[in-house]
Structures are given as C-alpha cells and as structure tokens.
Amino acid sequence: MAKEKDKDYIQEANTLADRAVSDAKDILNNYVQSRTELTQNQFFYYPMELNGTASETGLPFMRFGFGGTNGTNKVAIFLYQPPGVTVNDAAQYTAMNVGTIRGGLNLLRNISDEKKVTRGDQVALGLMSKEKLLSPGSSVDKITSGAALRAGVASNPYTRTAFEGIDVRGYTFAFRLVAESAKEQNQIRAIERTFRKFLYPKRAGAIALVYPPLCDITFYAEGGRNEYMPNIKPSYLTSLEAVYNETSTAFHKGTGAPLELNLTMSFQEERVLTRDDLYRAKDGTANDNEIFEADGFAPPYKKGSDVILGDS
C-alpha cells in the first residue's frame, strides 16, 4: 500500500510540474513587456536650426528614435551629421584541412593501381597510421618524425576556407555640443539624459529586467531621407561617454551649465544580418539586382516552403 501511495504522490507531483511548465510557456509566448512608457512624444534638437527648418535648409542631420516594443509614444533626437561615419561589415572564415579524408580516400583508391601511387606517396603512407590517415581533424600534414625529415616528404593538407558567420555590426558617433542660448542648454541636457536613460534596463519585478529600447538611426539631407548614407538596423545603445568642458573651465552665468559637452556613443545592431536584410525584393527574399538598402529586417521563412511568416 505504501508503494502505491508513493506512486500516486509522484504522479501528482509530475502532473503539477507539467502544468506549471505549460503555464510558464503560455506566459512567455504571450507576454511582451513595454520597453518605454511615455505619456507624450518628445523631440529634442541640436543645433536649434534643425527644429522644423531642416527640410527647408537641406541641412544633413541624423535622427535617433526610441520607441521600443509596445510603446505608443516615442522620443526623437535630431543631431547634426558628424564627419567620418564608419560602417564595418565583416564575415568570419576559418581554414579547414580536408586532406585527412580527401587525400586518404584518393590514395586508397589508387593503391590497387601501382602505376598511380608515387614513390613519395609510398613514403608518406609508411609514416602514417590508418587512424591518422582517415580521422577527421587529424594533423597528417605535420609529419615530424626523423624518417619524414630525412625523406623530405609531407602530406598535402588540402586546406580550404570555410565560412563561419557574420559579425554583428556596430557604430560609434561623436558629437560636440556647444550651447549658444539658454534654450539650447536645455536641449543639450535633455539629449544627454535621454540617451543615458535608454541605455539602461528597468526593473519589472523582484528579479526581472526589461530590455532597453531599440534605437532607430536614420540619416537625412536635402529635406528627405539620405539614401547615400548607410541603412542602420534597429540597434541598442551600448556605451555613452559624456565629457563636460573638455577645452574650457567656464560655465554659463545664471545656470551653471557647462560651455560644451562632448558625447561619444556606440550602438550595436540587434542581430546578425543576412543579405535578405539589406537587399531584398518585395516578397522578402534576397534580390541580388538591388542596390538600395531595405529598412528593418527580412521576414522569416516558413520551414520547408517559400511562404513568408511576416515581420520578425
């Protein structure tokens, strides 16, 4: 009887655990935390000439927009375009030696035909064990025995370049902000504090943290989107350096505001890109004929078909 009760307890515990896991999965699948909770839209400018006149003057500038998932209101910061904007696209490759398998199999095929086996192959074969000849990843290209050195024979590693992946792109921008009026002082302070605010996560409970919002970075010139500048995908602000009065010790009278503020900010895109994310057709697939860069990320494929699931 005791054993049967123990089985009942175990079965009940397993049932409760399965139910808890299922409930947790449902919560995770349906829960999306708002990353920003703004009561109104906010706009900040430096220099002040960008406030409503950029489309008329054609000044080149950048827009940094924070909104985040489920955010109804947004923050937009407009700054002049700094010199020396750099985009670093990089792929990772590694050297892979296929000689252990390819060379070994070719040699074994030729052993039956003595005319195809060279004297050098015979010497190299005599210096290798069967495992070293055919095992993936073995270093048959490094025969260092005394006999190999005397014979002057080494195996061909058949080295190939193998693709491993793409680096996540990152960007760094530096701005020098010098206030010429009290209004511009307030704008500079708001710009600095807003960037710093959205670098950090916020608490969503005793142990939970909400991700910082993503930043949309866009270039403008001549009153519209500048298609000649890079199309930066939604990015996280990863570092912010603020230097107050780098070349001065004076402050504005009456407010105590520093004369100048140097901001250096680094951003990192949310994910690794594929060609589809940058150059794609209307159906979301890569278009190798396209030169204009698309906004956002390519929608994911449905496995086993060409059907697009929707925005990622």
Image (tube, rainbow, N blue to C red):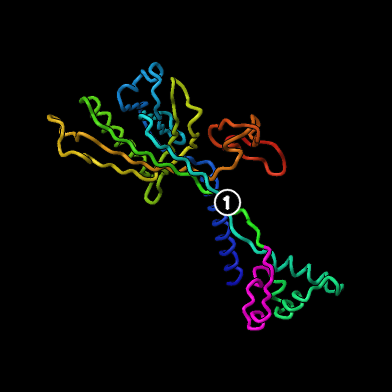
Residue 237 at what x, y percent from top left?
Answer: 40, 42
Q: Is residue 132 left or right of residue 177?
A: right
Of 23 and 241, nearer the camera is: 241
Res. 203 in view = no
Q: x%, y% of residue 132?
A: 69, 75
The quarter of the picture where residue 68 lies is: top left
Q: Residues within 10 Å of mark 1 (few under 14, many from 20)?
A: some
**Image height of 111 relative to 95, above or below:** below
Q: What stretch is highlighted in magenta?
A: 136-158
Q: Is residue 3 left or right of residue 306?
A: left
* Amino acid type, label 1: Gly
Give the percent coordinates (x, y) of residue 134.
72, 71
The quadrant the C terminus occupies is top right
Helix, strand or loop for the magenta stretch, by majority: loop
Q: Which residue sits furthest left?
A: 254
Q: Residue furthest top?
A: 56
